[in-house]
Amino acid sequence: MKCLSLEQVYLYIEKEVSPSESNKIKEHLATCRKCKNALEERRTLLQASESLSLWQTPPDFTQQVMARIFPIRVPISAWLTAAYAGLGSISLAIFILFLITGQNFSNFLTSLNHSLLNFIKNISPFFVKLFKIASLFVKALQQFFEYLIKAFAAFTTIISPQVQIIIITIAIILIAFSIYGIKRKILLGEKA
Amino acid sequence: MDEDKKLVERTLKGEKEAFEMIIQKYQQPLLNYIGRTVGERQLALDFTQEVFIRTYSSLQSYKPEYKFSTWLFKIASNFIVDYWRKKKIDAFSLDQQKRDNDLPPLQVPDKELPIIKKLEFAELKERIEQALEKIPAPLREVFVWRHINEFSYEEMAEIKGLPVGTIKNRVFQARELIRKRLEEIV
């Protein structure tokens, strides 16, 4: 048998060759020092590779993954506990208020109600005016668009389509130039 | 039905504890595969978590005729390949290796220095870890599967969707390249 290929060497170490081939390799190794050395070298390499130290996961790794898969949902009982706690705190606050001011709770609520009512009284005329102005503005805008549509309809019946195209094109160019001009003016102003 | 398939079935029925057992069983093998392919511990832990989350969300598509561990590692491998793509680790592809003329010899060389025998076993293991980082990522992957995760060639071929012969060849190249890198380190 001629000298082994390196792949054969590995397959022989891993017992991945047929029994007959294994016997032939064994016979060859008994007589060939070069192949025997190569085999010993690679056998040690594989043994060392198989005993490399293992990376360890932290002790709470499973819990971390589970918490990401199943996020904790607050049960209804927890919400109820929070509501009871809130109610309890408010009652306690009222009791302390009573102890400090000597006022009972109904007086406190009446005075709170009065100040709230005064505030609404003061602020409501302003909102009414604001609403009227807004509705007038909307009406004016509506009227303007109505006239605009009528004017456009009259324009399309009087003038021929070719002329219409020319006028629209000129209008677009004029608008574009005006926008460009305004922009430039602003930029120059900024530079100055 | 094997234990893993029963755990999958129980998870699909809503038993959280069953998936917890899957995590406990596979966290270390996955971390060792991912850790050795990405190199950083914290990143490897994050990726391992991500693989379990992906596995859970696609558990409905698992077909019991396949081995669960193979399916799980296929998810992990796809995840790692995506990471390599994003990190542009194409520079370490096998084509690069061919261009660099880094291919191992096919026959036992006439004059070969006994580099491995010279080293103490503990030192050799340390050097192998260093050499592992210096070989192309696709070769590192199969080396880890073969020697750390102890997969058969057939299992690796199924994970990668490649012929067994291709996988055997990659493992062979990985080992010889590690030996070559050891020579450089020593």
Image (cartoon, grey):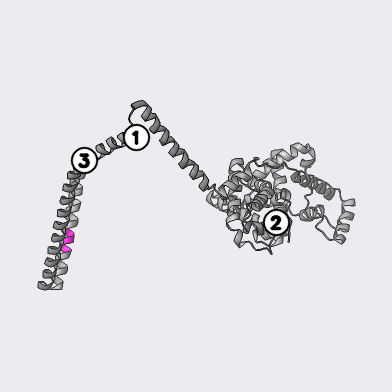
The residue that label 1 is drawn on is: A105
Q: Is residue B160 above or below residue B126?
A: below
Q: Callout 3 environment at 10 Å: few (<14), some (14 to 19), or many (20+)? A: few
Farthest-out residue, left: A158
Q: Are marks 2 and 3 in contact (CB under 8 Å)?
A: no
Between A3 and B82, the one nearer to me in the picture: B82
Q: Which residues are magenta?
A: A169-173
Question: Where is residue A21 shown, x and y percent of the image?
Answer: 85, 60
Q: CA distance from mark 2 to mark 3?
A: 72 Å
Element type at marker 2? helix
Let me know if marks 2 and 1 both belong to one chain: no
User: What is the chain identity of the residue bearing mark 3?
Assistant: A
Cα–Cα span, label 2 and label 1: 66 Å
Pick the residue in front: A107 or B166: A107
Q: Residue at x 49, y 44 (%)?
A: A80
Residue A190's tag is 3
Q: In whole angstroms, how far apart are the C-alphas of marks 3 and 1?
A: 62 Å
Residue where numbered disc 2 is placed: B4
Could you tell me which chain the residue with mark 2 belongs to?
B
| Mark whose residue sits in front, 3 or 1 | 1
Report the residue at 16% width, 60% height from top: A142
Q: Amino acid at mark 1?
A: Phe
| Tags 3 and 1 on a common chain | yes
Query: Which secondary structure is most common in the magenta stretch?
Result: helix
The type of residue carrying mark 2 is Asp
Inspect the magenta stretch and tell me whether residue B40 lies in it.
no
Decide which of tag 3 and tag 1 comes sooner along the chain: 1
Q: Position of residue A143 (x, y in %)?
A: 13, 60
Task: Tell me residue B79's x, y (percent).
Answer: 58, 53
Looking at the rendered structure, the kind of residue marked 3 is Glu
Quick check: A182 above or below A96? below
